[in-house]
Image (cartoon, grey):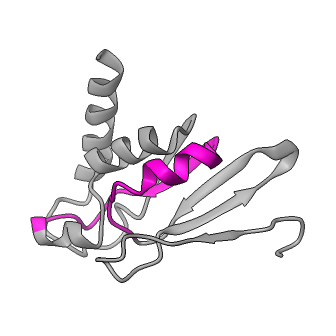
Amino acid sequence: MVGKLRPRRLEGDPGSGRALGCAHPGHRGRTVYLAGDSAYFEGLREIGQPLGPELALLPIGAYHPESFRKVHMGPDQAVQSFHDLQSRWLVPMHHGTFKLSFEALDEPARWISFARSRQTAR
């Protein structure tokens, strides 16, 4: 327990070797999902069904070349994760600070805006 927060560690994709994140039950039963440095995996649907976190903090950087997606999600996968988690709000993180991969520093933010607008248009 951290203050009034009770973080719950959630397992990630067994193939990545990384824990996916934590769910934080918050004020009045609201839940925040904080993904660690993680890749997309279909188990997010299973996390979303019982939790339905209102807020999802998801990483969107360091995804190029394609092989990096085994441990990092791209903006398109963050939008898919947001839907799988059944969240109301998406806060993109882990982008635009350090050059860790081959995409431009500003590409993840531009791409997530585009990906989100495409999802809304459907």
- 15 relative to 11 in the view: left or right: left
The image position of residue 75, as x and y in percent, is 29, 49
The image position of residue 12, as x and y in percent, is 44, 70
The image position of residue 74, as x and y in percent, is 26, 55
The image position of residue 53, as x and y in percent, is 62, 46
Q: 105 or 11, which is in the foreground?
A: 11
Which residues are the magenta region?
A: 38-66
Q: Residue at x 36, y 76 (%)?
A: 14
User: Would you place residue 47 above or below residue 10 in this image?
Assistant: above
Q: Residue at x 59, y 56 (%)?
A: 33
Q: 77 or 52, which is in the foreground?
A: 52
Q: Residue at x 48, y 70 (%)?
A: 36
- In this view, the residue farthest toward the top is 121
Q: Residue at x 40, y 48 (%)?
A: 81
- 23 relative to 42 in the view: left or right: right
Residue 54 magenta-highlighted: yes
- 67 relative to 6 in the view: left or right: left
Number of marks drawn: 0
Quadrant where the N terminus sits is: bottom right
User: Would you place residue 71 above or below residue 78 in this image?
Assistant: below
Q: 99 or 113, which is in the foreground?
A: 113
Q: 74 or 11, which is in the foreground?
A: 11
Quadrant where the C terminus sits is: top left
Quadrant in which residue 17 is drawn: bottom left
Residue 50 magenta-highlighted: yes
